[in-house]
Amino acid sequence: MDEGQLAILMVLLSNLALCFLIFGIRYLRSRENMAMIEKGLDPKLNQNRPAPFMNLKWGLLLVGAGAGLLVAYVLADYVLFRPDKWGHNDADNPAIYFALIAIGGGFGLITSYKIEKKELLDKKEI
């Protein structure tokens, strides 16, 4: 098989896989809705429920990933590979920027969780 035939085969298979994925998602969602209707529940009520713990989960994931990336950068740059160059300033390394973006985004999601949880508790008291 030459490269042209392999490329065409990969394009066809990826399109077929995408179609199966979309069909599977729609099929499972409709089965879930039918099961909720059989139990006497309204499927539309399930869609609009707030999920404050989802923000906490993603926030903690991003903070952990960012902190891990930051620690890896510091270890690789200052401790493991350059022990003689303490205070080395390498502003061109993009790892620090990705780490700080993930940490900042994670703290934002954790703050969102706290606000949503406070709002839910306020609604329950009223």
Image (spheres, grey):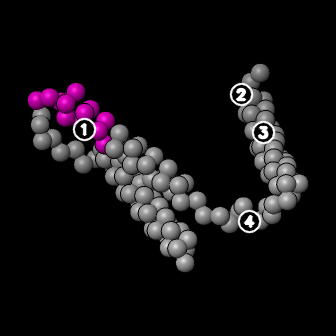
Q: Earlier in the sequence, mark 1 or mark 2?
A: 2
| First along the sequence among labels 1 and 4 | 4
Kindly identify the amino acid type of the residue bearing the numbered disc 1. Val
Q: Main secondary structure of the magenta part?
A: helix
The quadrant holding residue 1 is top right
Note whether 99 is above or below 85 in the view shown: below
Q: Is residue 84 left or right of residue 124?
A: left
Magenta stretch, residue numbers: 70-84
Q: Are marks 1 and 2 in contact (CB under 8 Å)?
A: no
Circle nearer the viewer, 1 or 4: 4
Q: Which residue is mark 3?
A: 17
How far apart in space, not on screen, are marks 2 and 3 (Cα)?
21 Å
Cα distance in 3D space between marks 1 and 2:
43 Å
Task: Give the residue at mark 1.
Answer: 74
Using a 10 Å C-alpha cutoff, classify the residue at mark 1 as few (fewer than 14 neighbours), some (14 to 19) or many (20 or more). some
User: Mark 3 is on which residue type?
Assistant: Ala
- Say which mark, if any, is on residue 33: none
Residue positioned most to the front: 125
List x then y, in percent, for residue 37.
86, 58
* Residue at the top extreme of this rendering: 1
User: What separation in Å lies between label 3 and label 4 (alpha carbons)?
Assistant: 32 Å
Q: Is residue 84 left or right of residue 107?
A: left
Q: Secondary structure at mark 4?
A: helix
Amino acid carrying mark 2 in the image: Glu
Q: Label 2 neighbourhood size at 10 Å, few (<14), some (14-19), many (20+)?
A: few
Q: Which residue appears at 79% of the width and 32% of the height?
A: 9
Label located before the other in sequence (2 or 4): 2
Mark 1 to mark 4: distance in Å? 48 Å
Instruction: Please name whichever residue, 12 or 109, is drawn nearer the observer in this view of the structure.
Output: 109
Q: Which of the two residues, 85 or 114, is positioned nearer the viewer here?
A: 114
Is residue 71 on the magenta stretch?
Answer: yes
Q: Position of residue 76 (x, y in %)?
A: 26, 32
